[in-house]
Each structure stands twice: as C-alpha cells, then as structure tokens.
Image (cartoon, grey):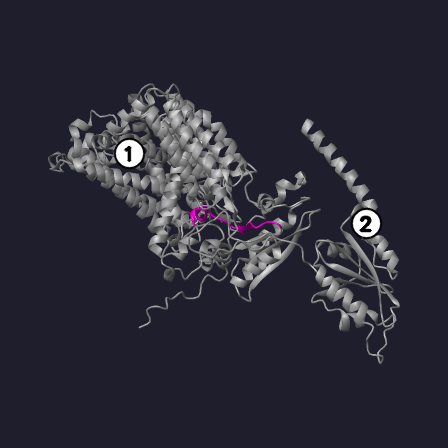
Amino acid sequence: MGYRKGKSMKEVRKQKVLREWEKKKMSAIKEEISKDLDVNIMLVNKILGGKEKSGDLIIRHFNIGANSEFKTAIVYMDGLVDNATIDNFILKTQMIETRGIDPERPITKDNLSEIIKRYSLTINEIAEIDNMQKVISAILYGDTVLFIDGSEKAFDLNTKGWEHRPVGEPHTENVIRGPKEAFTETLRVNTALMRIRLKDPDLRVKQLTVGERTNTYVALVYIEGVADQTLLEQVERRIKKIEIDGVLESGYIEQMIEDSHWSPFPTLQYTERTDKAVANVLEGKIVVIVDGTPFVLIAPSIFTQFYQSPEDYYERFWIGTFIRFIRLISLFIALFAPSLYIALSSFHPEMIPSELEITMAAGRSTVPFPAIVEAMLMEISIEILREAGVRLPGVIGPTIGIVGALVIGQAAVQAGLVSPIMVIIVALTTIGSFACPSYNASIAIRLLRFPMMISAALFGLYGMMLFTLLIILHLCSLKSFGVPYIAPISPSHLGDLKDILFRAPLQWMNRRPVTMKPEDDTREETRGGGNDG
Amino acid sequence: MMAKSGQKSQINQEPKETSTQFVITSRQSAAIIICTIIGASILTLPRTVSAITHQGAWVSTLIGGIIAILLIGIVTKLNMRFQGQTVVEYTAIILGTDRAPVIGKLLSAPILFILIIFWIVEPAVITRIFGEVIVSAILPNTPIEAILITMLFAVYFLIIVEVEVIGRFNELAFFVIFITGFVITFMTMKNIQWTNVVPFFTVGPVSFLKGSFTTAFAYQGFVVMMMFLAYSQKEKNVATNMAAMGLVTLNYVLIVFTCVAVFGFEELQHLTWPVLEVVKSTDFASFLLERLDGLFLALWVAAAYTSIGNVYYAACLAIAQWLPFKKKNSARKWIGLILLPLIYAMALEPDSVQQLFRWSEYLGYYCVITFAIPVILYVIALIRRKRRKGENHGKMASQENQSKT
C-alpha cells in the first residue's frame, strides 16, 4: 500500500510540475514565427530564459541591405557554435556583401529571404523553419537561427562547433594488433568513423531522439538488405517506447531495451572499438550509437561473443583459436576456482593427490576459519582492491595493486589468516576474470562466483554442479532480440559453430552466421590472393 | 532519470510470433531422448542384468536397446501422424469418433492416467536413487533430505521455463552427459579381464529375453517424447531419434560390458552401485585427480537432473493439457508446484535401499505397459486411418519449414 501511495504522490507532483511548465513554455513554444522581429526575439527570450537566466544565449541584431534598411538578428548559444563561421560567413557576408548587390535587382522586402539564401549566405547547410519549436531545438543543437524582420520564415544555419574530445585510442578493449581508433563522445564523429570503414551505399544511419529533457540523438547503424528487417523494427520499437528524462550513457538505453532486467548476463554488447562495431554490422546486427558516449551498443548479442575479440580475426587462425581457448579456460577459472578449492578441501579431500593434500593440510593447519570463510575473506578483499584500483588516480593505481596483492597476501599468509594455496587461487581468479574481453560479461562471472562458493560450501561438488546447471538453464532461457542467447550451440547450427570455440580460417567463413537471421547470408566469396598459380 | 514505471513492464513485450508451435529442432529432440534415458538407473543396470544373464549381460542390453530403438521409431511415426499434437490430444482422436468426441476422451482417460502416474512416480524414484548415491559416495555426512530438497527445488526451475528452453537445455546437457559417459567408460576399460566375460552364452535364450526385460527400466525415458515431439516437426526425426537411441544403447552396452569384464558377474551381485565401483577402481591421470568417482558423480548430477526434470515436465505438461485449464502455461507451473511435495514424499517413502530397488523393479514392470501404449495406439491409428484433422496442416507446416531452411 505504502508503495502505491508513494507512487501516486510522485505522479501527482510530476503532473503538477509538468502543468506549470507547460503553461509557461508550451504556449510560447507552439507559436508560429511572426513577421515582427521583436516578437520573435521576445518569444525566444521567454522560452530560453533571456540573457539574465541563460548567460550563454547570444542575440545579435544587425541591419542588412544596400542602405542597411532591413532589420535582422541571429540567435545562438555561445560555446555550441563555431565563432569564426558566424563572424566570417554570416555577419560579414550579410552586413557587407548585401550592400554591393546588383542594382538591376534591388532588394525589396518580398525577395529579401530569397536573395540572402541565393547570393549572400555562405553557409553549407541551411533550412527554412517556421515555428518556435524548431527554432529552439536548432539553437540547442548548436545551430544559429537567423530572423528577418518582415519574414515569416527563419533560417536554421549549421554552425555546430562545440569542443569535443578528439578520436583517441580505446581504453577498455585493448588489442595488440588492430586499428587503434576508438569511438568518441560525438555522434556525428562516430557515424563518420563507421562510414569511413564501411563505404557501402546500403549502410543506413537511422536517427532517433530519446530523453524528454536531454533530447539525445540515438542512431541505428545497419546495412539494408543484410540486417533482418524484423530485428530492425524490434530495436526501433523498443527505443521509441523508452520514456525517460535523460540519457547520459548508452547504458541507459541498454537497460531500457534489453530482454531480461533480472539476469546477471548482458543481453546487449557494448564496444568502443570501431572495427568491432563494423564487423558486427557486417554480420547483420544493428549498432546503436548514443550521443554523448563512446560506447556503442550491439544488438542482438549472444553469449559466445563475450569471449571473442576482434583480434582473433587479425591473427592467423591457429593463434586466434588458441587465444580463444585460453580465454575460455580463464572464464572457467574465474567462475569455479575458489569454489573448487572449497569443495575439494572441505568435502572431497580424497580426490586431491596425496602429496598436494598434505601440503594443503599443512598450509591450512594454522588457519582458524573454515575454507568458505577463508575464501570469502580473500575474494571480498580482492574485489575491494580492484574497485579501489579503478577509483585511484592513474599513477597510484598499479602501485596499490602490487601492495594489495603481494604485501597483504604475503602478510595474511604469515599471520595465519589464509593458506598459501588460497592466495594462488584468488590471484588466478582475478587474472582469469580480466582475460575476458568484455567487461560486463566478466562482471557477471565475478558476481556468480559468490553464490557458487556458497553452494560449494554447503554441498561440495554436488552443490557446484547443481548451481552450474541452474546457470546453464538460465542462459538457455535468455533471448536477445529473438535470438537464443546460447545460439548457435543450441539450437545448434553446424555452419555457425566454426566460429565459436575455434576460429576457422577466413576462407571458410563465406556465409554470415545464420543465427542472426541475415537477409542476405552470403558474404562475398572470401578468397586468398596469395596462391593464384 | 526517472522512467515512467507504469509502462516499464510492457516495454519489451513483443507481439507473439506465429511459429511458437515447432520450437524443438531434430538435434534437440535427439538430445532430449539421450538426456532423459541416461540417468540414475544406469548405476545399477550392470548388476540387475548380469544377475540373470551372467557373462552375456551386454547381449541382453543390446537386445533391449534394439527393442527400444524400434519403439522410439514407432513413437516418432505416431507423432508425425499427428503433427503438433501431444499424446493427450491424439489419444482421444485415435480412440474416439468424429461425431462424439466425448467417447474418445473417456476412452483415452485410463491411458493418460497410466502415463501420468508413471511420470510422477518415476522422478521420485530417480531422485531417491540419486540421493542415495550422493550420500553414500561423496557426501556421507549430509542428510538425504537435504539432497532431495535441493535437487527437486532445482528441478522446479526447469518446470517454469518454456518447452523451447527444455530443448536448448538438453542440447547443452547432452555434451556433459555424453562426454562423461563415454570418457569414463573408456578410462575404465583399462582394467578389463577377458576371462570374466568369455564365454558369452552360458545361459539359455529364455534368460536372455528375461534379461532384456529387466533393462526396460533403464530404457524407459523415451516415453516422454510422446509429449515433446509435438513441438518438433522435422521430417528426419525418425532417423535422428533412432540414432539417439542407438547411442544410448551403445553407451549402456559398453558400460555393462566393462562392469562385467572388470569384476565378473558373481562379484557384481555384491556391489550396490557397480558403475560407481568400477569408476573407483580406475586410476587414470592420478597425478591430477586421485580419484575419479567424485568428479564422475558431480557430472552425473546433470544426467539425473535432466532425467528427473524432463519426466516431471512431461507430467506437468500432460496434466495441464488434459484438464480444462484456460492458461496452460501458468497451469503447468502451478501443477508442478503442487506435485513437488508429492514427489518429495514419494521419494522418502522407501525405507531402505533394498526397498528402493524393489520399487524400481516394479516400476520396470510397469513401464513395459507404457511401452505398449504407443504400439497399440499406432496400430489402432493405422487400422482406423486416423490422422490429424485438417490433413494439410502438417504439410503446410513442413513446407513452411522448408522455405525457412
């Protein structure tokens, strides 16, 4: 009851705020542009709060025409625009060059806009707009709006030019060999990065706006004729259904459109690598770029993608396969190592070879806790160290890692709090979870490690196996945009399996994975150029 | 940053896709067969068979397997005749007439009753067998109730998922079960003594038939396919299903042969869990793991889990379809929940392992009746020329499927 009451109160408050806001703004924002310049400027001031409340709002009045008889004004947000463009190609051309117009064709009030558009406005992208809503959104997106006294149309001039981070190297998904360009925070730069790698006329960049207040641009990038049409509709429908006031990171979109909110496993993949995004688009998937974050989303995503890295395809296939196996083993270690230690040492010591068992027992003889407490102690402290390592300033981070791992570990063994084997296992587990190329999958494994340890402490190997079966069952029940999460292992597709555990030679991969239901499943015949004799 | 919570639950609701009917692929149906059959009963199979046929135990197992292969073929054929329908639906059609469907429903009631009772008792017995093994072999200090409760509780998670998830889960579990089954068998072959197995034929032919009769309980799991095949429609199902049964037979024959060859049939009679003993007796890769039985049993949890889960699922699905529930899906979940304490109580019912074995023996006789059901139904369907109503439904579905692939 309390919850419902609280919710309705919240709802009422929101409604009230909305109504007030609407009364103040909406009446103004719905207005058409008037012929009177002063009315237009007054409306803009009213909506955006004027110079007193919005310090970065710039309104510049000036006159144009042979005798400077026509009143005009430009409105823009300082900082969002490129000042040089405004100075050189709006103000200078309008104020100076409209004077020297051919006397054969004198400027009158009627043909003013036409003449400006045709002869003196040296801006590449302009649009005529006729209502206040468009004016405001143009200003907020970094455009400049030119009002002309006596005209019912205003010009939306492209002067976007805010400061943004240049394209840099990826920080989260490092590879040894491969392109070093990562996405950046600006949507347009990101779409350009994709287009420059995929010069396909069928590449589509479908733009949507999400967020009632942030009005964030979201772009769906896909190849028409390759991506499944129903998949595209599904992604688009889910994004359009989002009702949220702000989108600050693609994580917001991810959580609002994913299939299962409750699962620890991510059903959407994210990446900041351009090559990875392009590779996925080529497989018939859809990449969702969100303005304001370098992390783009890939839909749909299946489990096997999370231990694959673009680098697998850049090295020759033996190496790619080997590295992939190493990653799988490390995933298993990250999930099972501490629980195996607990299960074997407290339930099934007979399974450990005798010499090792004696050493382990000797190591544990001074430890006052049962194995589960010992393991929890170490695992939790390593998680704390890891979290602290992320927050610490760059220079100190690695140092703390060494202090934590070596010094504390060594001291804990000497103090008799934990056994030496436990330190080895914790170290292996941590390193193992770092070997997973995608962070959100490795975090799921880190999370599941703890219930696994508890079930191992309760029922030994039997408990571990039961919990593993439940995890597998959960993975089986997940879907990502209609694609089973553990495809193509099950429902099995032999053709797709060549890129799951193994990484088959590129020559064999002349079909797109059927799992993603591509409309056109044939890649161009991939043929080596080397051996043509 | 505040989403309108009212609409949240609806955000990812997709319109129902049209092809929810046929969600199990033929490989998945093969996996379901293998995972359902290979379960707890394999642990005692070598003892029960060799008690009657001595050295020739593997021959009886082979005969039983061949019969089972034929039976799964008949079950698949029957399902192809009534594509998209489960045993609950087609039994009524086969036995009834078009004019008075009530007759068919009434006549089918005892048959379905026999099946469902079987599908409820069997998980209980398997759970108990498995609990006994776990307690006696790897968790001696744990009360058996704890094992039964955790196992049944975990199995319940299988009941609440859709049928297509069952298919996928079995396909994954297949690898675990199958690989352990064969790897363990080949490892133990090291200790084979040929003097224990030759000559094969020391008893009369009647004993061989009797021996294969005792393997019935080990092979019975495939009857659940009368439910699951309704969700599968591939034409090559007959071949794949029979091949799956062939693999099961091969595994059984190898294990029975190995057990007899390692211990000899006399000694085998004194071992409660012969397969477990044979695993204990091997030292393969002992530099890594001193003993294999713990690992073997841990992996065998998957086999028991799928056996119990699939049969239990079939029971819940059948009851939900049989009784006039409106929402079949949620009915299945509730039925599963109601059956859970019942199965638990039944699993605790036998007082001792001896009594438990007697139970499984009786269940073995009982399941011969369940074997007869598909055969009888198929014969009647052939004689009465009964098919799924709306002949072209099946054809259309298969065409649709072809165009998809």
Check the image and report above or below for A448 versus B22.
above
Q: To which residue does mark 1 refer?
A: B42
Residue B112: assigned label: none
Q: Is residue A437 visible?
A: yes
Measured as percent of width and height from the top left, residue A215 is found at: 69, 50
Check the image and report above or below for A187 versus B196.
below
Check the image and report above or below for B281 versus A512.
above
Measured as percent of width and height from the top left, residue A244 is found at: 67, 44
Q: Which amino acid does label 2 sit on?
A: Lys
The magenta-colored residue range is A292-308
Q: How crowded is mark 1: few (under 14 residues within 10 Å), some or many (20 or more)?
A: many
Q: What residue type is labelled 1?
A: Ile
Q: To which residue does mark 2 refer?
A: A51
Q: Is mark 1 on a helix, strand or loop?
A: helix
Chain of the residue that carries numbered disc 2 in the rendered image? A
Within the image, what quadrant is residue A113 found in? bottom right
Q: Is residue A246 magenta?
A: no
Q: Distance between the residues labelled 1 and 2?
A: 84 Å
Of B157 and A152, nearer the camera is A152
Q: How crowded is mark 2: few (under 14 residues within 10 Å), some or many (20 or more)?
A: few
Q: Is residue A300 magenta?
A: yes
Of A219 and A472, nearer the camera is A219
**Label 1 with label 2: CB-CB less than 8 Å:** no
Q: In percent of the image, x 42 and y 60: which residue is there? A: A511
Chain of the residue that carries numbered disc 1 in the rendered image? B
Is residue B168 left or right of B179 when viewed as pictured?
A: right
Closer to the observer: label 1 or label 2? 2
Measured as percent of width and height from the top left, residue B175 is found at: 34, 43
